[in-house]
Amino acid sequence: MVAVTIDKLAVSYGGARVIDNLSLMIESGSFFTLLGPSGCGKTTLLRTLAGFLDVADGRLLLGERDLTRMPAHQRDIGMVFQDYALFPDKTVFDNVAYGLRARKLSETAIKPRVGEYLERVGLSGFPDRRPAELSGGQRQRVALARALVIQPQLMLMDEPLSNLDAKLRVQVRETIADLQREAGITTVFVTHDQEEALALSDRIGLMKQGKLEQVGTPEDIYRTPVSAYVADFVGAANTVAIRLAGPLAAGDGQAVPFGGALVSARVPKPIGTGNAVLIVRPEDVMLDLPSPTAIAAVVASKQYLGGTTHYAVTLSDGTRLSVALHGPGHSAHAVGATVSLALDAAKVLVVES
Amino acid sequence: MSLPRQIGSVWFWLTAALVGLLSLFLLYPLVNMLASSFASAGGRGGSGWGIFLSDPRYLTALGNTVLLGLLVTLGAALIGVPLAYFAARYNFPGKTLIAVLPLTTLVVPEVIAAQTWLMMFGNNGLITRSLGDVGIAIPSFYGWFGLTTVMTFIYYTYVYIGTLAAIRGFDVQLEEAAQGLGTSPNTARWKVLVPVVMPAVLASCLLVFTLVVGNFAVATILGGRVALLSVITYQAFVSEMGSDPVMQSTLASVSIGLVAAVLFLQRWIVSRGRYEITMGRGAKPQRLKGLSALLLALAASIVVIISLLPLFTVIAGAFTRARGPVMRWGEWTTLNMERVFLNAPDPIINTLIFAGIATLISVVVSTLASYLIVKKRTVLTPALDYIASLPLALSGTVLGIGLVMSFNTGWLTLTGTAMIIVIAYVIRRLPFGIRNASSTLYNVPNSIEEASISLGVPPVQSFFKVVLPIMVPSIAAAAILVWTTTVSELSASIVVYSGGKETMPIQIFRLIDSNLMAQASAYGLVLVVTILLPIIIATTIFKIDVFASR
């Protein structure tokens, strides 16, 4: 079942078209993440869903309801903000009860419900505290409870973890994942952090300059990026410009030129003659393993990180690759040593440049 | 927001309503006044500008005003800057006393300052007579001597406050870095601190200049034979009331032009001086010992004593027996106070009512206006922003004349009503109220309102339910500041008031004019208490930081 339908949406902001002709469907009950660098339009899209920005063209549907021109306060959407946006003069209880009171629920009905949601976010201890007396993680939990308690049809989260320190970020992230799964509320989550996106999402929409560059499951996005941009943004990747002598059909095990040799690669979509990009992740490069297609390289630098070692190696044609090794002997290669290099054929991609 | 959506929103119409109100009570009088300065003066030939340029009396007044402005600004800087520097960088005996200085300008209305200086140094003054008894003659206090002295001691606090904030915000690490690069401490200070603090000093000096140009109370009471723009503007108004408004308009326009020019200069300096230094670590004050500490403490206490002199004098004067203009110092009585409360309490009642209503309106209007300007921008917002800052360029006298000229007759006749006094009060304090509320609003993130809206509360109700409660402490502080400055307002109200509508400052001004200093002191004491009481209650009971946003 489709919860959110975005149909040929256009949004203008300060005279410029920030989003143009964007279409997307989000499954009911799923966790959808809008991922991208700052300025890519992900927050604009989220705020348009919330009703804080006007739709210039196209349509927005929530289930069967047309949201396109509906005022924000009638949309029945829960929103969690980057800066928590708690009401500073109100207690934790009153913050969470705010939406219920706006819905004219009786105080006798409100009390147990607020209590229930405070317990769900792990904050049942302090209903009478004010936001200033809470830590950042606690504040965001209150904000979560406040948005969830109204049992909205859609949850919107605008970088809710980015103001928290690394440890809290993981904790609150887990809370968000648990709550979303329990409540089954369709959620749209905005972040620039690929790790958050991979960890939380059912599907990810990666945005670039107001357009969706790729939409897919975390595995899709990570394993089969459609472009060097996606590969670069999600996880670390080596993106190497190559020249194809002839067109390539889609399929596995295609021979492509790389580092003066031919390597086997996956081609998700057919590519014409000329410039293309070869994508290989650092962990998919192997050093000094017996391989028929080994390429000679020199170790240029080395960073020992305990469980893994990161190398930079230079090929004979000057191409530089990042390599991440783990397992026995991962730190054995010295700077300046000549090594033979092989790529994991199943994980090498070639896409259009 | 697109234009059709803007026009459909309630914020657009609220902005339009405020622009309309301000156009009626501020823009229209101003335009009216400027226009009539170009009309031909009845029977004298030529427009007001022709007369202004041909009559040496007017040009002399303009020259005097500029000269007085420069003298007072210089004097204020000479006291305010060193005082701020030493207060920020050194500890010395009695330093805590200096902390009360910013309060004195607020608590002692200009009219009382002028009056109490006269009670000491006037022709009949206590100090003049005591010195005369031992054969020392001091020059007449009326004219340049009195004007510069009194105004300097009123206005130096503005320079002091501005400079102190700048020095405290200055990152001392810059100075240390300069020393680390091989400059001596004194050179480092000169080369690093001075350029950074200078814009703030200049800006506060220019503010002082505009205040001197607009000053009415001290200029009229102590001016003597020195013709000043504000005084002759008022005289033109008093003598030509109802017959020939050309000259008063011309003179008012001249002072608007003068103040506007200085304000533009000030804006330019402030915009050039943005170095973003607020994150810095301020210098730790050094402890001074020995002779230098003693000298500094002495200098500082002289400034403090002189600043507080009006307060002591007005208290003493209020309880001193007087026969006509002669004060019998040392003979105490409660007669003056009794007369104020029992025989003529009208000025007190008028002040409380007018200022109370004005404060209420002012707080509502400036809260709404600042919310519209900061949070709900529409195509009309720039217009509201500009019109609302216009009163900064208008002295009270000028505003008063504009209002009287514009609402003397016609469909909206306000002259002679209490309403016009309240309007003058509200308009004069508007820019300060808006600036105050805006500084709070800039710190309220938009997301708070959006959170409320997304939880199902419509925009207008969201403002009342979540934004307004956050603003309450600053609104309270603003209300107190508006109250204190409104109850002591003189220059506009003396132009627009009519018989029976006297306020305390007007009554004091008239008593000074009649040389009845004991009666004036009695009203003065009530006025000071009226100002101080809300401040004391707010800071001690409600813990409101009245001066946080000043």
Image (cartoon, coloured by chain):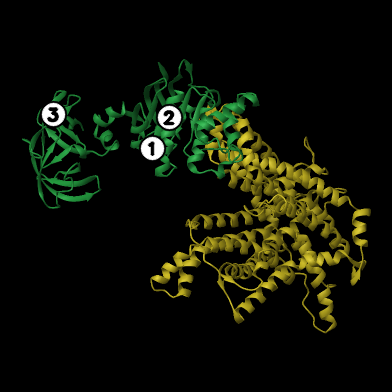
Q: Position of residue B76 (x, y in %)?
A: 64, 67
Of residues A181 and B460, which is closer to you in this image?
Answer: A181
State the separation of the CA atoms marked 2 and 1.
30 Å
Q: Is residue B508 left or right of residue B58?
A: right
Dot 3: element:
loop
Look at the image and tell me whether residue B490 can be seen: no
User: Do marks 2 and 1 share a subunit?
Assistant: yes
Q: Which of the numbered marks, if any, corresponds to residue A39?
A: 1
Residue B351 place in picture, x, y as percent: 81, 50
Point out the tag, 3 or 1, that comes first from the N-terminus. Answer: 1
Q: Please tell me which residue lies in front, B469 or A107.
A: A107
The mark tally for this picture is 3
Kindly indicate the quadrant of the structure image that contains residue A1.
top left
Query: Would you say the residues marked 3 and 1 are in contact, meaning their CB atoms lie under 8 Å apart?
Result: no
Q: Residue furthest bottom?
A: B135
Q: Earlier in the sequence, mark 3 or mark 2?
A: 2
Chain A representation colour: green
Above or below — where is B262 with respect to B11?
below
Residue that numbered label 2 is attached to: A178
Q: On what subunit does the disc labeled 3 rest?
A: A
Shown colour of chain B: yellow
Circle 3: residue type: Thr
Q: Are marks 2 and 1 in contact (CB under 8 Å)?
A: no
